[in-house]
Amino acid sequence: MTLKNLGSLSILLGMKCNNKCPHCFYFPRNDNHMPIDLDMLDDALKSIEGQHSIYSVNFAGGEPFYYYDVMLECIERLKRHGINLFSLSTNGSWAGSVEVAHEKLTELLRLGLGAMYVSADGFHQMNIPLKNVINIIRAGDIARASGENFNVCVMSSYLGYYTYDCEINRITSKIRRKIWEAGLYPVETFVNAHGRAAYLMPPELQVNKRLDRKCWEIKIGILNPAGPSMVSIDPAGFVDGCFGVPLGNLHKESLNDIFQRYFNNPGPIVKTLREKGALGLKELAVERGFVAAESYFDECHLCHRARNYLKEHCSDEFGEFLNPAACYPPVLDNKAHPFEDWNLAQLY
Ligand code: SF4
C-alpha cells in the first residue's frame, strides 16, 4: 500500500457550533459534542507511520475554539508525528476583542500555527458581528509586527458564483468591502453543494447536465483511486474521503486497515464513485426509486441528492457506507428539507 498522495488531514475537533449556517456541510443535531479522542488519533498515525506524506493539518469542526485546549494538545502530539504545518478554520465568534483574539493566537503561534481561515460573508454574519473578524485581523497584524510568520485569511462564500445576483451575495460583497477597508483582501469562494447546501442551490443555478467528472477531477485528490490527497477525521472516529463518504471508522479498525480496504475493497459507494462518479450514484438511486432532476448545480450536488435518497430509503443496503449521520437529513427543526423553499430575503 502506498499513501504517498496523502499530504494533509482535516481534523474535526468537535461538532459544537454556535451557528446554524444554511450552507453548512453538516446538518445541525443534538449530537454528542465530545471532543475528538487524541489517543485515537495517535494510534491512527502510528498505524500508517512511514507510509504517508502528511505535512499539514487543518483544524475545523464545529467551531474549533470550543475545543481550544484540545487543539493545543493535538498540535503538540501531531508534532511528535513529524507534522509541523497547522491551520484552522473558524467563524470568529470567540474573538470579542482584539485582546482576546491576541491572547488565543499567542499560544497557537507558540505551537506553530501558520494560518487562520476566518469566514466572513452573508451566511456567517447572520449571527456573528463582523467586528470579531476585524479583531482577528488586528491580532494577526500584531503577531506579524512582532516577527511571527502567520497569515489571517478571510474566506467569503458566495452562493453559486460571485457575480450571481441575489440578496445573500450582495450582502457578502458589502462585507468583503469592509474587510478590504480594514486592510485585508478577502478571498472569494463559493458554496459547495454539500450537506445542507445541497438544498440551498437556486433552481436557476442548477443547469449542468453532463456531470461526468470524477471526484478527484472536481476537487484535487479527493477519493483518488491512486490514494486520496486529504481525508478528514471526525470525533465519532469516521475517516471521510468526502463529506458523508467514510472510508472507515477508527473505533472499529486501524487507519492502516481502513486504507488497505480503500485500495482493495472500498464498499459500494466509493467503488461506484470511482468507476462512474456521481452519475453512478444516480443510477444506483434511480434503480431504487429516486426521481432525478434533469440538471444539477454540479456533480457534488447530484451526488449528495442521490446519497441522501439512499441513506433515507435504502439504509439496510447502504447505511453503513453513508456516514456520519450529521452529513445527512433529517434536521432538528422537524422539516425534512428546510431550505427547499428558502427565501433569501429572510437574511435581512
Ligand atoms: S462527487 Fe460526491 S464524493 Fe465526489 S467530490 Fe463531489 S460530493 Fe464528494
Image (cartoon, rainbow, N blue to C red):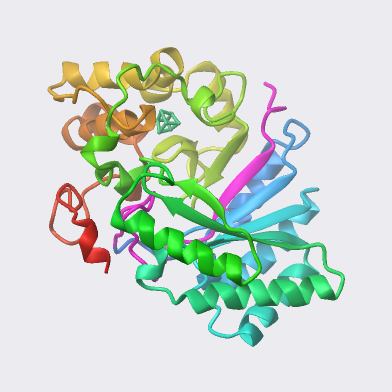
Q: Compared with residue 115, is residue 147 higher up or lower down, i.e. above or below?
A: below
Q: What quarter of the picture does the C terminus occupy?
A: bottom left
Tell me which image quadrant ligand 1 sits in.
Answer: top left
Q: Is residue 153 magenta?
A: no
x 20%, y 50%: residue:
330
Q: Compared with residue 195, is residue 28 higher up or lower down, i.e. above or below?
A: below
Q: Is residue 27 magenta?
A: yes
Furthest residue toward top: 275
Q: Nearer the viewer, residue 49 or 52?
A: 52
Asked which quadrant contains residue 133, the reply is bottom right
Q: Is residue 325 visible?
A: no
Q: Could you say where residue 233 lies in the image, as x and y percent from the top left?
A: 53, 47
x 72%, y 40%: residue:
54
Q: Could you say where residue 325 lies in the image, as x and y percent from the top left?
A: 32, 47
Q: Could you say where residue 68 lies in the image, as x and y percent from the top left?
A: 59, 72
Asked which quadrant contains residue 229, the reply is top right
x 70%, y 23%: residue:
2
x 29%, y 64%: residue:
30
Is 37 displayed left or right of 288 in the figure? right
Is 154 displayed left or right of 192 in the figure? right
Q: In the rendered picture of this protein, how many numbered marks are placed on residues?
A: 0
Furthest residue toward right: 147
Residue range of the region highlighted in magenta in the rendering: 1-29
Is 36 displayed left or right of 2 in the figure? left
Q: Compared with residue 213, is residue 113 higher up or lower down, i.e. above or below?
A: below
Q: Is residue 276 visible?
A: yes
Q: Compared with residue 30, is residue 224 higher up or lower down, i.e. above or below?
A: above
Magenta stretch: helix, strand or loop mostly = loop
Q: Could you say where residue 226 lies in the image, as x and y percent from the top left?
A: 61, 19
Asked which quadrant contains residue 45, the reply is top right
Q: What quarter of the picture does the N terminus occupy?
A: top right
